[in-house]
């Protein structure tokens, strides 16, 4: 695996990891909060055997550019980065894999650029319509998502700065994963999060999102986009879900087939949100089996 910073036509420079032969079938991996291309280290090693693997640090993360304006993180911006990166590498159609916020961008890319997305693999990332409905109708998911409101607070950077990045790691992120698996990676997170402006850039993904998270006692109306016709996801889609995810509950799988006609779901019962590196063998096997059939 090699990494290089690539200047894109969107005006953003991304730090991009690549592995495998450039002429092999392309697989692009998108990570989520609060990570980097390292989310996919186990998948990169496996699929570089017979694919050209590309895994950028998305804007605002890792060693990529970190603009401070919230407007730089509306979903169309990372989708544009994705397409610009593929263009830069001379890739037309590709299989797209996304986790967490990377999965959110993968859903949006498949909905808006089906001409470029050949196949879609989603790992613990909710479909936008299903997610928004659940935040209105499902009390457990609404409760689990209250952290989004906290992340949108204008004062949270000061709070994190006062406690220190390492304490923030130990008291927030580390609670959602196996601490033993984080030991070797912890310093990489601390280094990335300590870059000037990094915390604001990462949190701006939440601030730029149009998703509405009602308070627990709020009688919230369903947003208009949920009640109007919603386009289907055209590419064949594999959804891999760690069923012990405490932030994104299994309700995200209910009714998903209504919006994704060619859908396969693989449930991993003993994994949480960070299943790509919590249970890499299970994720790799699910991907291998599905790719061979599609």
Image: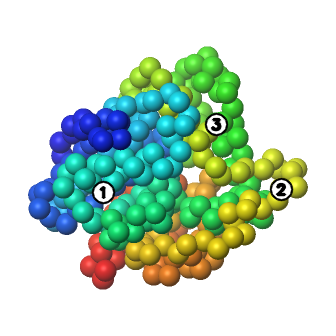
| Marks 1 and 2 in Cβ contact (< 8 Å) | no
| Marks 3 and 1 in Cβ contact (< 8 Å) | no
Q: Nearer the viewer, residue 241 or 24?
A: 24
Q: Under tag 2, what secondary structure?
A: loop
Image coordinates for residue 34, horizontal then vertical, percent: 48, 40
Q: Nearer the viewer, residue 89 or 133?
A: 89
Q: Is residue 170 something that shows in the picture?
A: no
Disc number placed over residue 151 in the picture, else none: 3
Left or right of residue 106: residue 157: right
Instruction: Give the quadrant of the C terminus.
Output: bottom left
Asked if 267 appears above or below 222 in the picture, the reply is below
Q: Under tag 3, what secondary structure?
A: helix
Q: Residue at x 44, y 75 (%)?
A: 234
Instruction: Give the mark nearest the N terminus, 3 or 1.
Output: 1
Query: What is the spatial separation of the Cα atoms under label 1 and label 2, in whole angstroms?
Result: 37 Å
Image coordinates for residue 29, horizontal then vertical, percent: 34, 55
Query: What is the spatial separation of the Cα atoms under label 3 and label 1, in whole angstroms?
Result: 28 Å
Asked which quadrant contains residue 139, the reply is bottom right
Disc number placed over residue 28 in the picture, else none: 1
Query: What is the spatial separation of the Cα atoms under label 2 and label 3, in whole angstroms?
Result: 20 Å
Left or right of residue 106: residue 171: right
The label nearer to you, 2 versus 3, is 2
Q: Residue at x 11, y 57 (%)?
A: 21
Q: Under tag 1, what secondary structure?
A: strand
Image coordinates for residue 165, horizontal then vertical, percent: 51, 24
Disc number placed over residue 220 in the picture, else none: 2
Q: Is residue 29 something that shows in the picture?
A: yes
Question: For the residue carrying disc 3, how many other residues have a C-alpha within 10 Å: few (<14), some (14-19), or many (20+)?
Answer: some
Render colour scheme = rainbow
Q: Nearer the viewer, residue 1 or 294?
A: 294
Q: Residue at x 31, y 38 (%)?
A: 14
Left or right of residue 36: residue 221: right
């Amino acid at each position: 695996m090699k990494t290089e910073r690539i200047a894109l036509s969107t005006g953003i420079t991304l730090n991009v990891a690549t592995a495998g032969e450039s002429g092999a079938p392309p697989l692009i991996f998108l990570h989520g909060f609060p990570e980097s291309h390292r989310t996919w280290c186990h998948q990169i090693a496996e699929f570089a055997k017979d694919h050209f693997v590309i895994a950028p640090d998305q804007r605002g993360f890792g060693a990529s550019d970190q603009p401070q304006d919230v407007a730089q993180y509306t979903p169309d911006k990372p989708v544009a980065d994705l397409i610009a990166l593929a263009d830069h590498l001379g890739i037309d159609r590709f299989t797209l894999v996304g986790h967490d916020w990377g999965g959110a961008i993968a859903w949006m890319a498949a909905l808006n650029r089906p001409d470029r997305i050949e196949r879609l693999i989603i790992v613990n990332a909710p479909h936008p319509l299903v997610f928004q409905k659940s935040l209105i109708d499902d009390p457990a998911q609404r409760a689990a998502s209250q952290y989004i409101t906290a992340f949108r607070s204008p004062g949270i950077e000061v709070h994190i700065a006062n406690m220190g990045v390492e304490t923030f790691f130990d008291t927030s992120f580390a609670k959602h994963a196996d601490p033993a698996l984080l030991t070797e990676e912890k310093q990489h997170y601390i280094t990335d999060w300590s870059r000037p402006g990094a915390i604001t850039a990462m949190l701006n993904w939440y601030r730029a999102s149009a998703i509405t998270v009602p308070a627990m006692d709020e009688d919230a109306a369903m947003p208009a986009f949920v009640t109007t016709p919603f386009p289907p996801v055209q590419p064949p889609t594999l959804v891999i879900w760690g069923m012990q995810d405490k932030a994104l509950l299994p309700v995200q799988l209910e009714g998903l087939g209504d919006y994704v006609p060619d859908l396969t779901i693989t449930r991993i019962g003993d994994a949480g949100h960070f299943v790509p590196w919590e249970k890499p063998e299970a994720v790799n096997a699910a991907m291998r089996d599905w790719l061979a059939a599609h």
